[in-house]
Amino acid sequence: MLEWESMTERTIFHKILDKEIPADIVYEDDEVLAFKDIHPKATTHLLFIPKHFIVSIADVTPETAHIPGMLILKAQKFAKEKGIDGYKLTFHVGKGGGQEVMYLHLHFLSEQKM
Ligand code: AMP
């Protein structure tokens, strides 16, 4: 059983990943989906989510420690391809850290346009 199948409710990001609800997807491959944040806090505000579900950085284990790094590399490659050379990458961790969606995601914020 996948981790999320034991949860009572799937998050909005599960539904975006499964294409049950629309999102402005800017990149997808076997490991990651990236889409525009619906309430952008910068000129370019994207969210990178792994296809392997993890709740947050607080739940990363030695077995899944490669996943946050993978998200960072995908964001780095995406930025290079779009000619963006200045950006911020952020993980919100837990409710106290401002995390509202309990599905690991990397915020990509830049004042440069894609
Ligand atoms: P966090 O506070 O780190 O959990 O960030 C969640 C982010 O998801 C927020 O910046 C929201 O604006 C964004 N968000 C919520 N629902 C959607 C959606 N349906 N499509 C795109 N972004 C969303």
Image (spheres, helix red, strand yellow):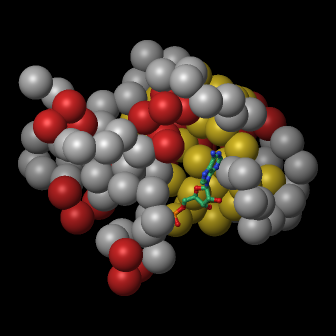
> 40 or 15, which is in the foreground?
15
Q: Residue furthest front?
A: 8
- Above or below residue 94? Residue 79 is above
Q: Residue furthest top?
A: 30
- Above or below residue 88? Residue 108 is above
Residue at 49% over, 43% down: 12
**Residue 112 makes an appearance in the image:** yes
Q: How many marks?
A: 0
Q: Position of residue 15 (x, y in %)?
A: 49, 32
Quarter of the rendered structure image containing ligand 1? bottom right
Left or right of 13? Residue 36 is right
> 110 or 36, which is in the foreground?
36
- Above or below residue 81? Residue 66 is below
Classify the position of the C terminus by image quarter: top right
Left or right of 108? Residue 16 is left
Left or right of 57? Residue 113 is right
**Residue 66 makes an appearance in the image:** no
Q: Position of residue 112 (x, y in %)?
A: 87, 56
Classify the position of the N terminus by image quarter: top left
Q: Position of residue 17 (x, y in %)?
A: 49, 28
Residue at 50% over, 53% down: 106
- Above or below residue 51? Residue 55 is below
Residue at 89% over, 49% down: 113
Left or right of 79? Residue 54 is left
Q: Which picture quadrant has residue 9?
A: top left
Q: Position of residue 6 (x, y in %)?
A: 14, 37
> 24 or 113, which is in the foreground?
24
Q: Residue furthest bottom?
A: 96
